Image: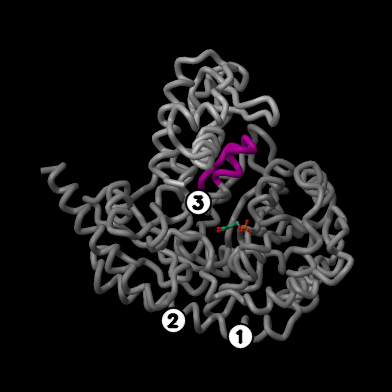
């Protein structure tokens, strides 16, 4: 069969269909063979193409018919505007925050570590083992598989000083990723139109989950040592909030870790005011240095709701995370989780448990800090060479990101676009601010790109900055 003859026949039939009434019967294959002087295979190929385009419907035994008078792709969705009403929330820029990089493009905006930093051999063996168990055909309890809940509780206990009441397996709830935990907690604990304190800058996805839950954000500035407890107190009192979403250790985006005073005073404040702290331990497995104990470790009465994800450290393909909540709040969050997702696949839960209890995981975790440090230093050094205009305020001791200030005269939007044109995705800092950003920043992930390409990525950022400088200087001049 000749492709160009089937193309020609398809084009001729398209114009026939355009002028025919909907439902008109097309000439038979025999007629088309005769009038167009082509083979039956060519006719079949042309009709298959038109069928894929939605222009014809073939009814075996009856023939081929024009599907509709309107061309495919011209559907009219305008009626949905009335049915849906006004959009419930809008967070500018956030829809682009999780967009994948184009093929061949380097991605310093990535949120997850690249496969070379994941324990993928352990994941592969775990999945093979789980595939041979009854879990393959079972559902899981709403709160999660018992063994995984026990592991999460014991992981927390191992980071809690002796003598402090720690969470037990019954306090743990397994979720499909911490992102769904954020939504469930915000809905269950805060509620629509209610205020919640949040650090500024913070994790963009927490802003998104809060917006979706209708929560009113009360931003509190957070520097390299965490927020000022007095500022937190003012914000609690002024807003009447009863919850604070926080990342006390290796915060996304800037890598800050609350100092001992902030930890002690803010937890005491929450207890005095009767407020919850939602402690997002997203980087629990990504320390490069000594890690302070989680706030939950100094919380006897259930003021801290902990979130701990295995998605980033085990594999983004095993979306498993856990919420630890003690007291009546546990049942509230459980009800939300049940309403949203019923339960997390037991295959994923058993596989995650298999990985984190394997000797390979222990070895992986021992090796990881040095590997992260190497990437962090590689990118920081390469940026100092190729993009010296960027200011690194804090060399993070954990997490996956560098947070860099832009020169004042450069617009973040121009830089982001110019970097993309140069071939590297960067994460514009504005997405991390619940209110107006005080300055321009980039968040660059040092762990989402293979080590041997970090220098190239930094060079492309340098090209992007130079291009943005030319553009912004021309605009301002
Ligand atoms: C601070 C923080 N919390 C939660 C998440 C979501 O993690 P998960 O993949 O477990 O949904 C992320 C992912 O980037 C994060 O950075």
Q: Position of residue 87 (x, y in %)?
A: 55, 27
Q: Is residue 91 above or below residue 68?
A: below
Q: Is residue 89 above or below residue 377?
A: above
Magenta extent:
207-220
Whether residue 234 can be seen here: no
Q: Position of residue 297 (x, y in %)?
A: 72, 69
Which residue in the protein does label 1 denote? Answer: 366
- Disc 1 secondary structure class: helix
Q: How is the image coloured?
A: one colour
Q: In the figure, residue 22 lies in which quadrant?
A: top right
Q: Kindly report which numbered mark, 3 or 2, lies closer to the viewer in this rendering.
A: 3
Residue 472 is marked as none
Is 474 placed left or right of 272 in the picture? left
Which residue in the protein does label 3 denote? Answer: 98
Q: Kindly report which numbered mark, 1 or 3, lies closer to the viewer in this rendering.
A: 3
Which residue in the protein does label 2 denote? Answer: 374
Measure how far apart labels 1 and 3 are at the Cα level.
30 Å
Measure how far apart labels 1 and 2 are at the Cα level.
14 Å
- In front of the other: 436 or 275: 436
Q: Position of residue 445 (x, y in %)?
A: 44, 65
- Disc 3 secondary structure class: loop
Is 268 placed left or right of 423 in the picture? right
């Amino acid at each position: 069969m000749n492709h160009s003859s089937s193309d020609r026949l398809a084009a001729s039939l398209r114009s026939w269909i355009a002028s025919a009434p909907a439902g008109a019967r097309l000439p038979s294959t025999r007629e088309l063979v005769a009038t167009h002087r082509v083979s039956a295979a060519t006719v079949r190929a042309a009709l298959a193409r038109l069928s894929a385009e939605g222009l014809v419907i073939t009814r075996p035994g009856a023939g081929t018919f024009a599907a509709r008078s309107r061309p495919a792709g011209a559907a009219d969705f305008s009626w949905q505007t009335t049915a849906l009403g006004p959009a419930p929330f809008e967070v500018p820029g956030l829809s682009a925050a999780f967009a994948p990089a184009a093929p061949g493009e380097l991605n310093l905006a990535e949120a997850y570590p690249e496969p070379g930093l994941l324990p993928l051999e352990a994941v592969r063996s775990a999945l093979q083992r789980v595939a041979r168990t009854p879990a393959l055909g079972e559902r899981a309890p709403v709160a999660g598989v018992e063994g995984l809940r026990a592991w999460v509780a014991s992981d927390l206990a191992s980071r809690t000083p002796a003598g402090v009441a720690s969470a037990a397996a019954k306090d743990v709830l397994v979720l499909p990723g911490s992102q769904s935990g954020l939504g469930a907690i915000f809905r269950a604990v805060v509620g629509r139109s209610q205020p919640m304190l949040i650090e500024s800058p913070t994790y963009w996805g927490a802003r998104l989950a809060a917006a979706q839950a209708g929560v009113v954000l009360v931003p509190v500035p957070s520097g390299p040592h965490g927020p000022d407890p007095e500022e937190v107190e003012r914000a609690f009192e002024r807003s009447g909030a009863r919850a604070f979403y926080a990342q006390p250790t290796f915060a996304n985006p800037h890598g800050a870790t609350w100092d001992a005073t902030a930890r002690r005073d803010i937890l005491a404040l929450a207890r005095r005011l009767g407020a919850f702290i939602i402690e997002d331990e997203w980087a629990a497995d990504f320390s490069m240095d000594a890690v302070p104990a989680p706030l939950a470790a100094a919380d006897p009465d259930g003021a801290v709701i902990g979130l701990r994800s295995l998605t980033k450290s085990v594999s983004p393909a095993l979306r498993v995370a856990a919420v630890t909540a003690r007291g009546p709040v546990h049942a509230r969050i459980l009800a939300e989780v049940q309403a949203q997702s019923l339960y997390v696949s037991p295959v994923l839960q058993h596989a995650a448990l298999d990985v984190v209890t394997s000797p390979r995981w222990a070895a992986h975790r021992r090796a990881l800090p040095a590997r992260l440090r190497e990437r962090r230093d590689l990118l920081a050094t390469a940026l100092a060479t190729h993009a010296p205009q960027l200011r690194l305020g804090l060399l993070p001791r954990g997490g996956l990101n560098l947070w860099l200030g832009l020169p004042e005269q450069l617009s973040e939007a121009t830089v982001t676009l110019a970097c993309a044109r140069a071939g590297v995705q960067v994460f514009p800092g504005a997405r991390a601010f619940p209110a107006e950003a005080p300055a321009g920043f980039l968040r660059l992930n040092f762990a989402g790109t293979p080590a041997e390409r970090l220098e190239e990525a930094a060079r492309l950022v340098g090209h992007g900055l130079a291009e943005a400088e030319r553009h912004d200087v021309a605009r301002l001049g």
